[in-house]
Each structure stands twice: as structure tokens, then as C-alpha cells.
Amino acid sequence: MHIAVIGSGYVGLVTGACFAEFGVDVICVDVAADKVERLTRGDSPIYEPGLEQLIKKNLQAGRLSFTTDIASAIRQSLVVFIAVGTPPRDDGSADLSFVESAARSVAEHMDSYKVIATKSTVPVGTGKHLMSVISGHQQTAVEFGVISNPEFLREGAAIGDFMRPDRVVIGGSDPEAIAIMRDLYRPLYLIETPFVITSLEGAELIKYAANAFLATKISFINEIANLCERVGCDVHDVARAIGMDRRIGGKFLHAGPGFGGSCFP
């Protein structure tokens, strides 16, 4: 199977390199020619343990390539992932201009059935909006499916998180598109990774709900740390004890800096 990944940032690079490691033919697209040139040499512009080695290995194997030619990449691919940034606007809402631009490019250059899958963190309703954007910008009417396939990668552990995820979430209403995504993720199905098949809106909300819940745990333990200082006890003891409750779990109960990152609008 041939796939394209639009956006060679953190999520796009990890996605492209890991799918190539699965044996898929991957073309990563970026508008920055200097970044593409660097990546073609096997030089990763970001640091993530194991990523540069994975890029070099799959470049040499011929399964991974980088380009600025989005038209060619789209025409060659059955699945097109959108993994561009959604930075916050001044009012805190997500700026979808890069996502919409990518969708318009897909619409203008598609010449056969495509699955358009969003990896970017987007508000609920974006998938249906992209259907309208793509339909409205097609040169000729071509069938397509839109899928929400959110990522749950931790910086510093992204390769392992992609290769051995807790679950794979696929949201959509087109049975053909869902079947293609299942086939793409077949290596994970073979190691009995749970698959969650849901609606577009369900998948989009799962990503936001997961982020919000983890942010809540971080904020909660920091508030408990403040309380511990006032009453004179050790927050580590409190966190360890409540984390032993399997309903709560011990992860993300480490007091310290507050939550943050590009996926929190």
C-alpha cells in the first residue's frame, strides 16, 4: 500500500517512519524545501529517540521518501494522512487553516478513490467540515472517505507508543475507508492491539477527552502538592498510595510543572 503524510513535523515524521517500518510505501510531504532536503539525507530536524535511525533505515530500504511535490504524492497514494499544525488563535480556538489547505490540495489533485485521515488534533466536527471542503474543491467528482485517526504519542517515547499502542482509534462512516485503515494497521492487529471503531465525532472527541483527563490528573496532583505543603506531609506518599487504587492508576500523578503542549488549545 502507498500512503502520503502531509506535514513532516513531530506527528507526521513519526507516523511516516513507523508505517514505513511496517512495510508500507510512504511519501512525507512538506512545504519547506530545506527540511525535505535534510530529511532526504536522513537527518531528522527533531530529536526523538530512535526516530533518525528509523528514517535512515527506511530511506535505504526504499520505503520512505520526502518531497515538496504534493500533487505527485497524492496521486500515488491510497491513504493521505493530514498531520499539520493546529495552533491556537488569540481566543484559544484551534486554527484549522493548515488542515483546510491540506484538504484543498488533496481535492485538487486526487484522481481516484482516496482515504483522507486526520492525525492532527482537531475540534469535533472537523471531519464533516473537511468532507465539504474536499467536495467543493474537486476538479472532477471522485469518491473519497474521511477518517479521524488521532495519535496518542508521548514525546520521548513516540516510537514505542506507535509500535505498541494502548489502542488504535478509527472514526468514520465509510465502510471501505474503515476497511482500508484496518488493513494499514494490520501489524498492530496481529499483536492484538485493541481497535476502537467509532464515528468521526467519536474519534475526534476521544482525543480531546484523553488530553483533558490527563491534564486534569496533572493539575489535581499539583493542587494536592500545595495542600501537602500546608499540612506538612509528603506528596509522593499521597500520590503513590492513591495510585495503587487500580481505578485511579499511578501514571500522571507526579507533582511538578503543569500540563502543556501543542495539543492543548
Image (spheres, rainbow, N blue to C red):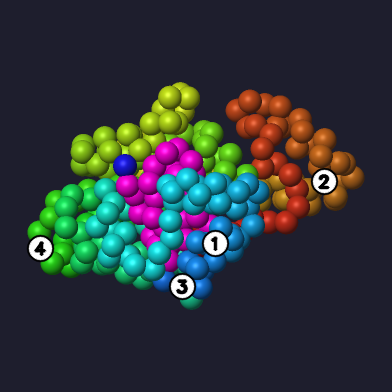
* Of the image marks 3 and 1, the number of the one nearer the N terminus: 3
108 lies left or right of 160: left
Q: Secondary structure at mark 4?
A: loop
Q: Nearer the viewer, mark 4 or mark 1?
A: 1
Please give the residue where the numbered disc 4 appears in the rendered image.
140
Which residue is identified by label 3?
32
Q: In whole angstroms, how far apart are the C-alphas of marks 3 and 1?
A: 15 Å
Amino acid at the residue labelled 4: Thr
* Residue range (magenta): 2-30
Indicate the amino acid at tag 2. Answer: Cys
Residue beneath the point at 15% across and 64% down: 138
Seen at 42% across and 39% down, the residue is 23
- Residue 147 shows in the view: yes
Characterize the local packing of mark 2: few (<14), some (14-19) or many (20 or more) Cα atoms within 10 angstroms. Answer: some
- Please identify, in this view, whether the residue under mark 3 or under mark 1 is nearer the observer: 1
View extreme (left): residue: 141
Q: Give the mark, 3 or 4, whose residue is nearer the N terminus.
A: 3
Q: Are marks 3 and 4 in contact (CB under 8 Å)?
A: no
Q: Which residue reaches farthest bottom?
A: 90
Q: Report the amino acid beneath label 3.
A: Ala
* Place of residue 189 in the rendered image (x, y in percent of width and height, measured from the top left): 41, 28
Query: How far across and how far down the image is residue 259, in percent?
Result: 64, 55
Separation of residues labelled 4 and 1 (CA atoms): 37 Å
Q: Residue at x 22, y 64 (%)?
A: 109
| First along the sequence among labels 4 and 1 | 1
Separation of disc 3 and disc 4 at Cα?
29 Å
Nearer to us: label 3 or label 4: 3
- Per the rendering, the mark at residue 41 is 1
Magenta segment includes 16: yes
Residue 228 disc label: 2
* Residue 201 on image: x %, y %: 32, 47
